[in-house]
Amino acid sequence: MLDMKFIRENLEEAERRLRTRGGEAYLEGFRHLDEKRRALLRDSESLKAMRNAASEEIARIKDKSQAQDKILEMREVSQKIKAMDEELKLVDDELQMFMLTVPNLPAAATPVGASEDDNVIVRSWGDPRQLSFSAKPHWEIGESLGILDFERGAKLTGARFTLYRGAGARLERALISFMLDLHTEQHGYQEVLPPFLVNRESMIGTGQLPKFADDLFTLRDPEFYLIPTAEVPVTNIHRGEILRKSDLPICYAAHTPCFRREAGSYGKDTRGLIRQHQFNKVELVKFTHPSESDAELEKLTANAAKVLELLELPYRVMALCSGDIGFSAAKTYDLEVWLPGQSCYREISSCSTFGDFQARRAGIRFREDEKSKPEFVHTLNGSGLAVGRTLVAILENYQQEDGSVLIPEVLRPYMGGLERIA
RNA sequence: GGAGAGAUGGCCGAGUAGGUCGAAGGCGCUCGCCUGCUAAGCGAGUAUACUGGGAAACCGGUAUCGAGGGUUCGAAUCCCUCUCUCUCCGCCA
């Protein structure tokens, strides 16, 4: 959520920055709602002040029959307050809902652009492998090796669900362990294992709700939501808390499955593991001092990229433009891995800083020093990495002409020494 | 699933025949005094949000005692609903 005081005082500037996202006029209607709310609030509160004073008087009067006039008068005042508060609540709710659907301001460093075509290549690592034979896409490799069973996955659940088998299942597990070990042992993250179902407040805290309910799998009775990313439960760990400044930055790494409806992407990536309703991801989440968030985003991105480097998978770093960053993000780097089977780069990690946007929604604060007011922390997160897509990248990059797949060196200890899937 | 207990400020913990209670007391913390250092001791201060005024320091108002609703001139205190925690029984990975 944006800072309402800032919006009130900088409406034009805020609107101008939001427009670089390419949407409608996001803040139209704010002024009206805000002023209406504050007018109602003023009136209601002055009546309450009057009532409180009168009640105190009544309390002092020993003989209550002497207070009858006052009591009758206040009875009316109370009714007026009640009516006024009902109206206030309507306006307040409307304003609240309004603010919850306004996206974050793009950071100054976010390139302005309309679509993903305007994203900027920041750097590249490794040479896109040119195989000496005709490269196959991962679904063909996986099926012929018997490690990915798309048909059975569809039978069990439906489209976009996959059954992993044997070395395939083991490879997925190896990747999860490898990534978590790297981030916890080398990069200073604490491993956490959160619930995979969260409540509504958590979804609002990180920005999935109220606007993007269509993207979520929902449970009724009780009302729970399957997490679309570990970002949700892990960021909400500190919802409503005031953190100690000396504890910042707080860095967590979590592996969770992620569940996404993928509404609106019906024709896209129908084959293979690229776009699944359920996939594994290792997520990195940071809570930082506002002055450190820019630097921490660079570190977080480098931490995620390190996984690709150790796996020797070529990738490039993209700075997403204003038209392509997510709802809650101020600035985002995508890591895109080279997939020879499809001759293209595909997103395998998305690393973002949210500034104080999520922290304000979720009420996550710290104190600059003992006596100062609590301020909002900055939150960041990034995939480190999407596990299914990493497995895809390995199958496609390490495929051999005979149809087998070599296991990257660093994963072999996690694969019981296995060097090749054949 | 059945029976019971409970949710108060950073923490602990008073407060229920409704009324100067944002809330005693203690701990912790901050500042000052004292002191060879530390400790102890003494004094003062120490919630959050919204809102009005002010350049600011700051001053005023409103709300908040798990959440929401009700009764009342007035509720931490009474009534209803919900959530969570704990104990016992049953069941279960």
Image (tube, coloured by chain):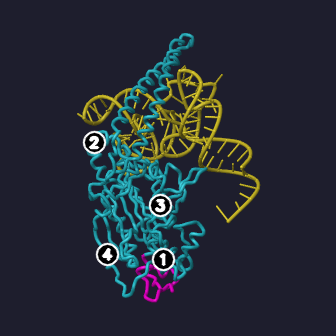
Note the chain letter of the yellow one. Answer: B
Three-letter code, disc 3: Glu
* Residue A398 vertical placement versus A79 (above, below): below
Residue A24 in sight = yes
Question: Which of marks 2 and 3 precedes in the sequence?
Answer: 2
Magenta part of the chain: A393-422
The answer as to whether the residues below labels 2 and 1 share one chain is yes
Q: Which residue is mark 3?
A: A262
Query: Which structural element holds mark 1?
Result: helix
Protein chain holding label 4: A
Question: Which of marks 3 and 4 precedes in the sequence?
Answer: 4
Query: Which structural element holds mark 4?
Result: strand
Q: Which residue is mark 1?
A: A139
Protein chain holding label 3: A
Q: Which mark is residue A10?
A: 2
Question: Which of marks 3 and 1 precedes in the sequence?
Answer: 1
How far, Cα to Cα, is label 3 from label 2?
36 Å
Residue A192 appears left or right of A122: right
Residue A419 in sight = no
The answer as to whether the residues below labels 4 and 2 share one chain is yes
* Residue at the top extreme, as displayed: A66
